[in-house]
Amino acid sequence: QVQLVESGGGLVQTGGSLRLSCAASGTMLSFNAMGWYRQAPGKQRELVAEITGSGSTNSADSVKGRFTISRDNAKNMVLLQMNSLKPEDTAVYYCHANRWVGPLQYDYWGQGTQVTVSS
């Protein structure tokens, strides 16, 4: 059974940095895209950043220039370096991965890690 385990969340002041890590277990197969979503109270879950196996990235406009996503394909890990954090970055951050098996796409989610940015 595939599991995504996140770590690295916490409380930080405005302008500070955090690094989120997500490690996949229970599989030797690689994923197509891996990335991070976030959900703030009362808001919908939104894409933060994602990266494909070939290294192509996509990120939300609100985090461009501040957050950097990277990936270790050999370890099935994805990292999110978050700099210059703002109070509006406060949310639960979820690791996400997907893969295609034949014609079917499978999506996997981590349990979420809280990021709180104090003003």
Image (tube, rainbow, N blue to C red):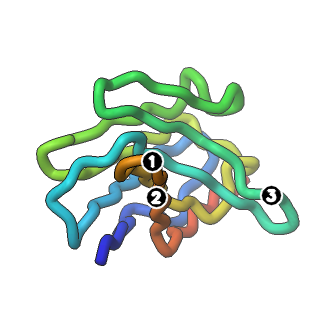
What type is the residue that disc 1 sits on?
A: Pro
Give the percent coordinates (x, y) of residue 65.
Answer: 55, 21
Q: Secondary structure at mark 3?
A: loop
Q: Quadrant of residue 54?
A: top left
Q: Secondary structure at mark 1?
A: loop
Q: Which residue is mark 3?
A: 44
Left or right side of 86 for 81:
left
For label 3, count other residues whose C-alpha is less than 10 Å away and answer few (under 14), some (14-19) or many (20+): few
Asked if residue 95 can be seen in this view, the reply is: no
Q: Secondary structure at mark 2?
A: strand
Mark 3 or mark 1, which is nearer the start of the sequence? 3
Quadrant occupied by the N terminus = bottom left
- What's the CA distance linking mark 1 and mark 3? 28 Å
Residue drawn at point x = 37 percent, y = 41 percent: 32
Q: Which residue is mark 1?
A: 103
Give the percent coordinates (x, y) of residue 72.
Answer: 21, 41
Q: Which residue is mark 2?
A: 106
